[in-house]
Amino acid sequence: MFNARTDWSASNEARTEYRTFSVETLTPHIGAVVRDVDLAQPLSDERAQDIHDAWLDWKVLLFRDQRIDREQHKAFARRFGSLHVHPMQHIRGGDPEILVVKTTRNSPYTAGDGWHTDVTCDEIPPLGSMLYLTEMPESGGGDTLFADMYLAFEMLSEPMQAFLEGLTAVHDGAGPYVGSYKSTPPEGGYPRSEHPVVVRHPGTGRKVLFVNRGFTSHIVGLNAPESRALLNMLYRHIDSTPRLWCRVEWAANTLAFWDNRCTQHHAIWDYYPHSRYGERVSIYGNERPVA
Ligand code: SIN
């Protein structure tokens, strides 16, 4: 368990110095490279607490030049919770706690090539994910964009914020997993859940815009044209406001750890016909998203 932050401020003045490392930031509000941490070495409680705090501050942490195996990757993730099993595991097979993220010239799609928050179709979506990339395209490319969903909410007008705060949306796994990836659902179908459109982050108490193009199918109680227009406006806000984003330029052996409760991401498939390989571990959330 981690100590709760008591000094959280909604300003963008997050720390860059922690007790056991410093960070180099990608933008003033999202994304930071953690310096001088070797994930192959045992992680002290003090350093794990620092990583937890920096993760709340910066939303996306990068650990560069790491040499870890699967068990070390999973052990690091377990410091933050138990390991998630992806809803498409019945098709993927292999280690249920590892999601292989592999794109080659023969891939019909690349995972995550569109703005989304991981697995929000789950009743309790993962609280975070750790993606460790070990093979990058020799052509260059293969970056990932991350968006700050606190800021996405804060940039909306007050009347729009107030309107959204009363709404609930449906998040449906069939959208991406059947619609985009053409997979056969498991018995009983893919998960489908309702979440408030604006949720409070359990670690910071800040409000988050919590709809995403990947999973959110519609807003409860609006008619279909209203729901579609509202969601399109919000998706357009996210994908046309570069100020919300940081761009992660990967190098082989980089591990990214993102807070899935306050971010969205978009993997960019700009490297065809080259290949990219990594493995992702996600961490179960502790509680349903609440307003
Ligand atoms: C994902 O987790 O959505 C994949 C991200 C990536 O491959 O950069």
Image: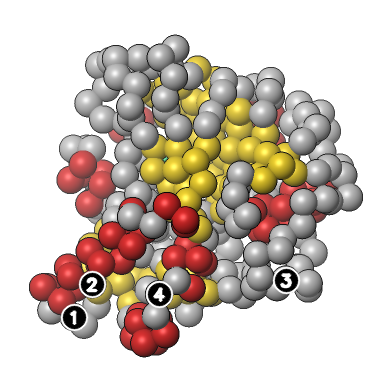
Indicate the secondary structure of the residue bearing disc 2. helix
Image position, residue 31 (x, y; %): 60, 47
Quadrant showing the N terminus: bottom right
Say which of 278 and 164 sits in front. Answer: 164
Earlier residue among tags 2 and 4: 4
Q: Nearer the viewer, mark 3 or mark 4?
A: 4
- Residue linked to disc 2: 230
What's the residue at 51%, 46% (across, down)? Answer: 246
- Residue linked to disc 4: 156
- Residue at mark 2 to residue at mark 4: CA–CA distance: 13 Å
What's the residue at 33%, 53% (across, down)? Answer: 239
- Residue at mark 3 to residue at mark 4: CA–CA distance: 22 Å
Q: Residues within 10 Å of mark 3 (few under 14, many from 20)?
A: some
Give the vertical position of 60 relative to 158 (above or below): above
Indicate the secondary structure of the residue bearing disc 3. loop
- Residue linked to disc 1: 222
Indicate the secondary structure of the residue bearing disc 4. loop
Residue 8 numbered mark, or none: 3
Q: Residues within 10 Å of mark 1 (few under 14, many from 20)?
A: some
Is residue 89 visible to the viewer in this orientation of the structure? no
- Residue at mark 2 to residue at mark 3: CA–CA distance: 31 Å
Q: Nearer the viewer, mark 4 or mark 1?
A: 4
- Residue 142, by quadrant, is top left
The mark total stands at: 4
Q: Nearer the viewer, mark 2 or mark 1?
A: 2
Earlier residue among tags 4 and 1: 4
- Residue at disc 4, CB closer than 8 Å to ligand 1: no
